[in-house]
Amino acid sequence: MRILDRLFGRGRNGGDVQIVSRKPAGRFQVVGVTYVLGKQVLGGVVLEGVIYPGYKLKGGGIALVREIHIRNRKVDFVVEHDEAALILEGTLKVKEGEIIEVY
């Protein structure tokens, strides 16, 4: 396997995102799903915990949180009761109202 493939996540398993933690760091309720410039964006409310970029979402698949926006501003994290948009790397099969776990 080449070193660049390993660095950019194009390994034997196709660059799949995996979760290694047993306990979720939080929960997120999806209010809306859209796509912006080819990236899936989930709008919703943080029900519990804290979400940072780099955390993984599990629900109808697994995806990585790339960026977090509140009211059209990029932020470093969100906490309970914040309404935010999560820009994902990868896609999830989720519906409005669904609650997903954050790892």
Image: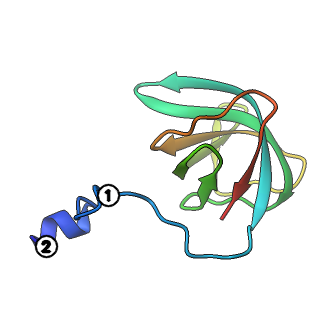
Q: Amino acid at mark 2?
A: Ile
User: In x, y percent, where is residue 9?
Assistant: 29, 61
Q: CA distance from mark 1 to mark 2?
A: 14 Å
**Quadrant (top left/top right/bottom left/bottom right) for the N terminus:** bottom left
Q: Amino acid at mark 1?
A: Gly
Number of the label disc, if any, that sits on residue 101: none
Residue found at x 23% / y 64%? 11
User: Residue at point 23% right, 58% down?
Assistant: 10
Q: In the image shown, does 61 or 75 lie closer to the viewer? A: 61
Closest to the camera, between mark 1 and mark 2, is 1
Crowding near pointer 2: few (<14 within 10 Å), some, many (20+)?
few
Q: In the rendering, which numbered label is found on residue 15?
A: 1
Q: Is residue 2 left or right of residue 64?
A: left
Task: Give how far across and how far down residue 58 sits, in percent.
Answer: 63, 53
User: Which percent across, then down, holds residue 43?
Assistant: 71, 32
**At 68% from the left edge and 76% from the top edge, which residue is drawn?**
22
First in sequence: mark 1 vs mark 2:
2
Residue found 41% across the figure and 25% down from its top: 37
Res. 3 mark? 2
- Is 61 rendered above or below residue 11? above
In the rendered structure, the answer to whether residue 99 lies left or right of residue 53 reads: right
